Amino acid sequence: MAVVGVPLLIDGSHGEGGASLVRTALAMATLTQQPTRLINIRSEAAHRGLRSEDLAILKGFALSCAAEVNGGEIGENSISFFPTRSPRGLNEHLDVPDDEDGPGHANALVVANALTPILARTGVFSTLNCRGETYGANVLTHDYFANVTLSAFKRMGLYAYASMAAAGYGIGSRGEVGVEIEPSHVDGLQWSDRGKLVAVRAIVATSELPDLVGQRGVAHLARLGYYANLGVDAETIKVKSRSPGAFVTVWAEFERGFGGATALGARGVRMESVVQGAFQTFLDWYQTDATVDPFLADQLLLPAVLAEGETTFKVSKLTQRFLTIVWVIKQFLPIHITIKGQEGGPGLVTVRR
């Protein structure tokens, strides 16, 4: 099919200028069927240009909307993306070669999360299998995605379910996750206040470690919860992996909101220290009046764009990453995204089509 139309030019160095800009631009191009050219991709980053994670996401979106792609090699600083049809459902394994000159293999949950909202609106059932990191530092991880992200999505009417065949700990690891995505009608959220606390939960995941390690993590979570006057419903799970590893996820569910925190174990670091790090970060968010944490705020933007009706939520910290995602969305759609607050501080966000 011949591609027509002048491509929308997106400067990949705008704002944070990172991976979130690339995947948001590809998602919006797929959604709107707008020919798009990205330039200056990661121009200020240590590893410039497209990375393996971008390529996995690019492959998924290109298959969904039968896009013609110019460029698309690791390290390239520009790419042209020409959708030729509206997005359709997928049944795909998304895997790419290791990023030998960059930060490592793709994060499997980032890939799955980027595609999920768009695939949910195709009207058909989709399945994804994504390989790469499943537990890492300062990235989206399996237990957070399955219990926080997807739980928040369900409140909007977007139904998806995640499972993990194997864990991958840290950059360059080779875990595997599956996501089943139902055709969904997405509605807006009114989360300007939290309402009542439903539960505080935690998962201590371990691989190739003695059972006692996970048990110590659960016991320490109970102690920390007691001193914070919080009942923490914690469990330990054993997951298959090619290498030893440990990971902690702590989150709270409210009537109108979710927020959580994570921590990756490391050789020579006691499990109690890993738990302490995750719980303290969680507590820092919990003690605010925000209805979402900064990471969940990023993930709610695209479903809010797709939603029928207005979405409002309160985030504990407006990050440059979040503001960059907002900027990208506005390049594609005449949408009202109102933000009350300043970068680095709390914010009240309203999204209205």
Image (cartoon, rainbow, N blue to C red):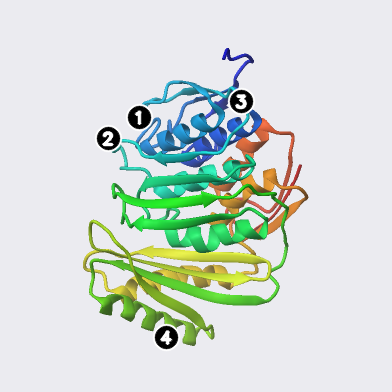
Mark 4 / mark 3, whichever is N-terminal? 3
Whichever of callouts 4 and 2 sits on the residue coming sooner in the sequence is: 2
- Name which quarter of the figure residue 65 lies in: top right
- Circle 1: element type: loop
Q: Give the quadrant of the N terminus.
A: top right
Discs 3, 1 touching: Cβ within 8 Å: no
On screen, residue 249 above or below 308: below
Rendered image: mark on residue 318: none
Image x and y of residue 256, in percent: 68, 67
The answer to whether residue 13 is visible is: no
Cα separation, mark 4 vs mark 3, equals 55 Å
Task: Using the numbered discs, state the Cα–Cα distance from disc 4 to disc 2 in whole angstroms.
Answer: 43 Å
Where is mark 2, residue-wise? 101
What residue is pinned by disc 1?
A: 74
Say few, some or many: other residues with alpha carbon within 10 Å of mark 4 (under 14 / 14 to 19 / 20 or more): some
N-terminal label among 3 and 1: 1
- Tell me the SS state at disc 3: loop
**Residue type at numbered disc 4:** Arg
Q: Is residue 184 above or below residue 315?
A: above
Residue assigned mark 4: 223
